[in-house]
Amino acid sequence: MAKVDYVYNTKTCRYEPVFMTSQMIFRNIFRFLGVSFMIGVIGLLVFNANYPSVDETMLASRNESLKRDWEVLYKKLDNSASELSVLEQTDDNNYRVILDMEPLAQSVREAGVGGREKENANIKYSLIREGYEKAQKIKNRLDIEEQSFAQLDQELAVKERMWASRPAIQPISNEDLTYLHTTYGMRKHPILGYWRPHKGLDFTAPKGSPVYATGDGVVEVAHTSVTFGQVVYIDHGFGFETRYAHLTEFIVRKGEKVKRGQIIGYVGNTGLSFSTHLHYEVLFKGDQINPINFFQRDLSNKEYEKLVELGGIATTSLD
Ligand SMILES: [Zn+2]
């Protein structure tokens, strides 16, 4: 049964039932809804003020995760910078020393580092900007190092050609060598009978023993002369030249490229020669120098001892 409200009527001095009009019903409904809405709004404001939303919680969690990732990235950048420093030091102190090059100036290494501030200024977050600058410095240093390595590569190619060209082996194999006259300097000529400079070494070996080019080069002379007999000159570039005299035969011709260790002729006794041997000269910038300093490369300690022993008892030249 519906609840009925009563109101005291002073005129009739009686309690009379109050019948709700539709207007009153609507007014009550609106009042109820208004109060509910106000309570809802206030509750929401209080809740928001005291508790983060689900989205905010997720964002905060993601921020923490990003910070951790960023710290890992920072460490990786720092590690890369340290490894790059080691590479730069190895470049300056090892590679460039070996190749006889000056270390890269610090001003060159720092060129470009710290540039692009305008670009950096557009990055809003300092943490990201700092990381970006770190990465950029590493990139600039890497660019410089890349250029340095290109230089090293070029220089190495030149040095390789130089090392391959430099006279560095004996022109006669130790198996064929029976005597070495280390008679570099003033000697009495065995045929002419007077003293004159002997500007090479004499290798005694059986006739027909192979004679080897002692470095890469180009044959500049291959002919017969009165004094040197059948003789070959090799231009090695970089100021070096070698001469191989008194051959019984040469097997290269002028202008031919030769490699170190290539047979260019055979031991003989042609020209102004006292006995079968190879007269060998090394020249640097046109002047003869002592060849004994130019063939350690293919000698073991024992072989070198033999060479010194043989040379120690030599007193005369053979041409
Ligand atoms: Zn000689």
Image (cartoon, grey):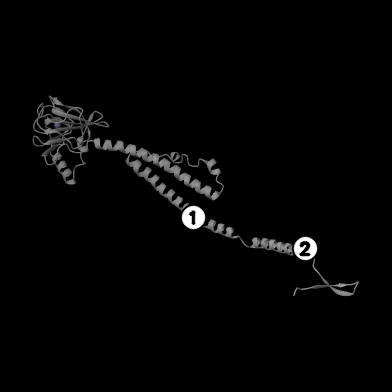
Residue 78: x %, y % from top left: 45, 51
SS for callout 1: helix
Q: Give the number of the disc on residue 27.
A: 2
What residue is at 53 percent from the left and 50 percent from the top?
Answer: 127
Closer to us: 235 or 154: 154
Residue 221's image quarter? Answer: top left
Residue 182: x %, y % from top left: 16, 36
What residue is at 55 percent from the left and 59 percent from the top?
Answer: 58
Front tag of 1 and 2? 2
* Relative to 313, 217 lies left or right: right
Amino acid, disc 1: Asp
Residue 130: x %, y % from top left: 52, 48
Vertical side of 247 occupied by 58: above or below: below
Crowd rating for badge 2 (residues with CA inside 10 Å; few <14, some 14–19, many 20+): few
User: Which range is magenta?
Assistant: 22-28
* Relative to 255, 48 lies left or right: right
